[in-house]
Image (tube, rainbow, N blue to C red):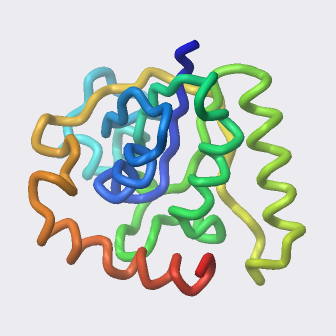
Amino acid sequence: MKERAIFAGGCFWCMVQPFEEQDGIISVLSGYTGGTTANPTYEDVLTHKTGHTEAVEIIFDNEIIDYKDLVELYWQQTDPTDAFGQFQDRGDNYRPVIFYENERQKEIAEESKKELQESGRFDKPIVTTIEPAQTFYPAEEYHQAFYKKDPLRYALSSGLRHDFLKQKWG
């Protein structure tokens, strides 16, 4: 059965590939959510006046991969202790958020966040927020599957993220 997950964790360019490579993923779309402006553009979101954050919308088959598995993978893509951006991407439009679709997703996300905090892996509080899903607006086509379209630029832009994640997750 199809289900939807929405995660924000810095630049959406870096959030697509890890999810897209999992069995049971039907699609991963880069876009904007959590704001007040209808149909925002990349340029609108960059002004920090729309309230949106860059995010990925993941459509998955929950008979193949569970939402809990996606949440666990999400933690491994972000710095959950940084509320003001991710790595070199700074500002509210890069804040880490798990957007839940229903009470089951909310409970899974909250329990997972609690477990991560109690694990001792991070020496600062886990500040990733867990919020109800809002309208998701797909980003412009040139942002979609960016890691495939421009691998060199993707590698350059994701270097700090990969270094941090390797240090924290091995």
> 39 or 142: nearer the eye?
142
Does residue 124 sit above or below 73 in this rendering? below
Q: Position of residue 101 (x, y in %)?
A: 63, 22
Residue 75 location in percent, x, y? Answer: 62, 59
**On the picture, is 143 further left or further right than 69?**
left
Q: x and y percent of residue 125 in the render?
A: 77, 71
Direction top: furthest residue: 1
> 118 and 85: which one is in front?
118
Residue at left 36%, top 30%?
27
Q: Quadrant of the N terminus?
A: top right
Q: Quadrant of the C terminus?
A: bottom right
The residue shown at (61%, 24%) is 62
Q: Which residue is depicted at the point 28% across and 29% down?
A: 138
Residue 5 lies, in percent from the top left, at: 54, 31
Q: Quadrant of residue 105?
A: top right
Q: Residue at x 34, y 59 (%)?
A: 14
Instruction: Answer above or below: position of 111 versus 128.
Output: above
